[in-house]
Image (cartoon, rainbow, N blue to C red):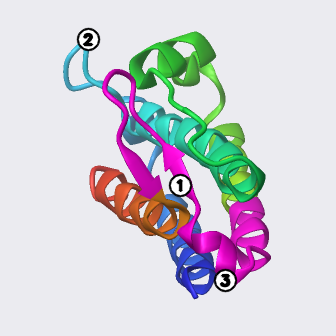
């Protein structure tokens, strides 16, 4: 299932992260744009939110679990955290997601979660898991 894909992504990206200089991690193309480090921090925030979705949706359907990505990145101040700590946080969170997803029973994959801020949009847990991986891949390309 998808947890194997996610584990492979984590292992591959950790090797690639070692090739990125500290200057590149911290560089902001514009004041309002995220640095590579902030993008990785955003992926940590996404992981935190999705761990909640992956667990809660198994016992409580239609729960509204959202977050304001810009606020989270700013509030957690990833730009001023040592890069190694942000990388470590991302690694640990995603390995936890691997363990969590690995243990989701097949019958729970059809359960529903609301991931939107305004008008409810309901998605199956299976869709949210796949979307999480797609979202991560999208942002990893910017790093």
- Measured in 3D between alpha carbons, the distance from the residue under mark 3 to the one under mark 1, in whole angstroms, is 13 Å
- Measured in 3D between alpha carbons, the distance from the residue under mark 3 to the one under mark 2, in whole angstroms, is 44 Å
Mark in the foreground, 3 or 2: 3
Boundaries of the magenta span: 95-123
Residue 49's tag is none
> Nearer the N terminus, badge 1 or badge 2?
2
The answer to whether residue 49 is left or right of residue 139 is: right
Residue 31's tag is 2
Residue 93 within the segment the image draws in magenta = no
Mark 1 neighbour class, 10 Å CA radius: few under 14, some 14 to 19, many 20 or more: many
Which residue is located at x 42 percent, y 55 percent?
123
> Nearer the N terminus, badge 3 or badge 1?
3
The answer to whether residue 29 is left or right of residue 24 is: left
SS for callout 2: loop
Q: What residue sits right under mark 1 in the picture?
A: 112
Residue 122 within the segment the image draws in magenta = yes
User: Looking at the image, which is closer to me, 65 or 132?
Assistant: 65
**Where is residue 98 shown, x and y percent of the image?**
70, 71
**Where is residue 129 shown, x and y percent of the image?**
51, 65
**Where is residue 32 shown, x and y percent of the image?**
25, 13
In the picture shown, does residue 46 fall above or below 143? Answer: above
Q: What residue sits right under mark 3 in the picture?
A: 106
SS for callout 1: strand
> Nearer the N terminus, badge 3 or badge 2?
2
| Snapshot quadrant of residue 4 | bottom right
């Amino acid at each position: 299932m998808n947890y194997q894909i996610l584990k492979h992504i984590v292992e591959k990206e950790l090797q690639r992260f070692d090739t990125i200089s500290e200057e590149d991690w911290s560089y902001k193309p514009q004041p309002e744009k995220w640095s590579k480090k902030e993008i990785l921090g955003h992926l940590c925030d996404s992981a935190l939110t999705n761990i909640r979705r992956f667990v809660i949706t198994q016992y409580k359907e239609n729960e509204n679990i959202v977050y304001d990505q810009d606020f989270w990145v700013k509030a957690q101040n990833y730009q001023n955290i040592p890069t190694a700590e942000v990388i470590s946080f991302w690694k640990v969170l995603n390995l936890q997601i691997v363990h969590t997803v690995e243990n989701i029973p097949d019958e729970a994959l059809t359960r529903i979660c609301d991931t939107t801020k305004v008008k409810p949009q309901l998605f199956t847990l299976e869709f949210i898991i796949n979307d999480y991986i797609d979202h991560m891949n999208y942002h990893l390309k910017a790093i």
